[in-house]
Image: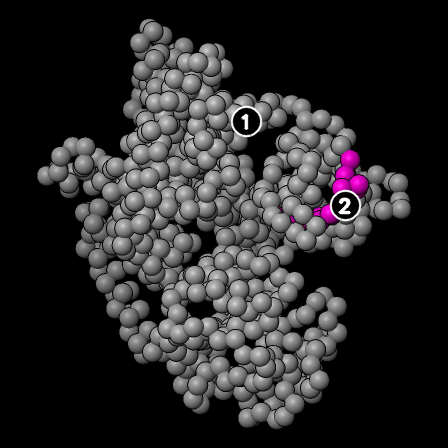
Amino acid sequence: MMYAGIAVTGACCLGIAAADVWEFPIYWWGGGVMLCCIAAAMLRRYPQAACIAVAAAFFFAGAGRLQLAADTYEALPHYVAGADLQLQGVIKEQRNSFMSEKGEMTRYVMVLEGFSYVGDRKFRPAGGSMYITIPAEPIYEPETNISLTATVQPIRYYRNSGMYDARHRDKEQSVFIKAYTEDRRSLRLLREPQGWRHWLYRLRETMTERFLTILSRDSAHILSSLLFGGHYEELPPDLIESFSITGLIHILSVSGSHIALLLAAVQLIGQAVGLKKNLLFIVSAGVVLFYGALSAFTAPVVRASVMGLICAYSLVARRDYTGIHALALAVLAMVLYSPYIVFDLSFRLSCGASAGIVLLQGRICRRLSFLPAFIRSGLAVCISAQLLLLPVLFSNFSSFPVYSFFANLTVGPVLDVVILLGLAAAVAGCICLPLAQGMLWIIKPLLALAVNGNYFIAALPYSRYWAGAFSLTDNMVWYLCIGAVFFSAIRRRLLAAAGILFFLSLAWQQWYKPEAVVYIFDVGKDKATCVVHNDRSVYLWYNKSQWANPEQVACVLTPALRYQGIFRLTQCTVTGHEPERTGKQIAAAFELAQPCGYPSAASQPAVVVPGDIPYYLYGEPPEKKMPVRPCLEIQSLNGRGKVFPVWAAVLIIHRGSSRDEAYTEWMENADVYDITCFSPGQDGQITGIYRNGQWTFSTYGGRI
């Protein structure tokens, strides 16, 4: 029964993931819960069978909870997309700022209270949230009530493997539309910010301002991020990159280590002043909850707070504290309250690291008994926190921090001291500013030592091990091997299963090795096609649109290529708007065998795959007949030659806009001539595999 909590929590999370793929009415999932509960009651004399039935009940409960959340999200007024509206709402948070042709713009998340159509005074109450992009001045603080006039649009999500899952994040926050306006006159302040959330926001900002009396602006924002999270936009990009390289990026947001440090300090102070256990628990709970509120109750904060409170209560109840049960309870409560959090990367990283520490730290410590205690403890925590996360790290970041243990052993303790002193300085600043400033003078050299030490470690050679995402088989083999190493009771079975899977996968990859793989990525108005040959040579074609995000290469293309394990390009061809600038961005992210090429005649056909592989890339429709049965990709249908290629085996067409009539006509012709047709804007990333003279295509959504 030791792992019963993890079993039911895992089943609940699996149910949530299943319901995201298979949409069934909520009463179907509810019926599954009832049937499983009845089965568990009937099988109560058979504990193992009853446990399976209970886990199945939680599976259906998780699926039903997600379906309920999905139905609520779909009930939001999506139909207003494309309309000119007078919007009214409350600012929730500020996201980011950027420069436009008319000046600096800022993006906010706004909780929508209601809207009216322009020219119609009828106010329609509405729920949900939206993104609004407005002039940077004036600055609106959280809980400010405003109105604005703008054209609202649906949110565009890029569907490529390896990208951040923004779609589920927005569903979790009920964000469903966006609006943009550069007209300051359309903005109107309805109510000054108020409420406890704004009070906490102002308290955090006041603490940061007090830090600025001694620390530089960068150092003050770094300290504020270490203590409460946030301020990421004010942090130097090089600093964030260095913390990512050393594996200490988690410390810039509030996590379990912060709650553990805070609880330890409260317990020590409480015991020193003679507080009784019940009163000490109440004080500990109050401090943790207040600190969580200051940190905006992000997913890692909530999980760490729940586990910390359970730990503190175990001291009062005089019962053994079991981290496994606490973690399972915390995760179960969170996913049932907000099911879309299962897809949140920070939540998965936080839970995976916690599970690794709880399950594996003790076993690793025993295996490292030959090392000194302080090294053994630090190494055990570092290894156990990352073992379960390795596939997640490669899937989302395509790299592993090689010097993570060294950074945690050297920089980590210094940052822990900085966090403790920083919390003390934040409290002291509310009572006696000179006392807080004295602490800040101590913090200043320690923070500089930690930051510069982290820069040094990040600059060491081979600080990152780059690799693409694990396949499904690789993931299974990895976790089977972990189980075989740490759980001796079933070691032989796990090793046998891992060995069989590994050799079957290896044989499959060698026997069915493709001659070439073509990736057509979903990069919005830009176009990107990449070909990987069986000799690992890689060719990239990128067409830059004038109306696309200037940073599209870094935001969309780079993570998509790295997910596929592509870090070196044999040849790169860039066309379109300001190709040299785009070429520099690609050269900064990838190793190039030769400089990027910038051909002027983008409309000329390019044989994407050399040799006899029938794949052709065109900037505009071809004017002459091509070889019979090729795969044909056309980046724009605006050219002169618009004769539909009835000889094509597969068509890949890039859509110009939602009103692209030529695109609609070509899609209809493809149905008439029974030609398989794809579009990155409609299907997401398209992957074509050429093997033994045959093409096999798949899309991001799984359509073939």
Amino acid type shown at disc 2: Asp
Where is mark 1, residue-wise? 205
Which of the 4 image quadrants contains residue 225? top left
Image coords of residue 552 (percent x, y): 55, 60
Where disc 1 sits, the SS reads helix
- Neighbour tally class for label 1: few under 14, some 14-19, many 20 plus, Cα within 10 Å: some
- Regarding residue 7, the answer to whether it shows in the image is no
Which of the 4 image quadrants contains residue 134? top right
Q: Residue 172 or 194: which is nearer the viewer?
A: 194
Image coords of residue 13 (percent x, y): 46, 46
Q: Is residue 583 left or right of residue 361?
A: right
Residue at figure coordinates x 77%, y 30% from the top left: 190
Where is mark 2, residue-wise? 183
Q: Is residue 627 left or right of residue 465?
A: right
Image coords of residue 697 (percent x, y): 50, 75
Residue at figure coordinates x 38%, y 19% from the top left: 439
> Distance from label 2 to label 1 (Cα)?
28 Å
Q: Residue 210 or 295: which is nearer the viewer?
A: 210
Q: Which residues are magenta?
A: 174-188
Q: Residue 306 or 634: which is nearer the viewer?
A: 634
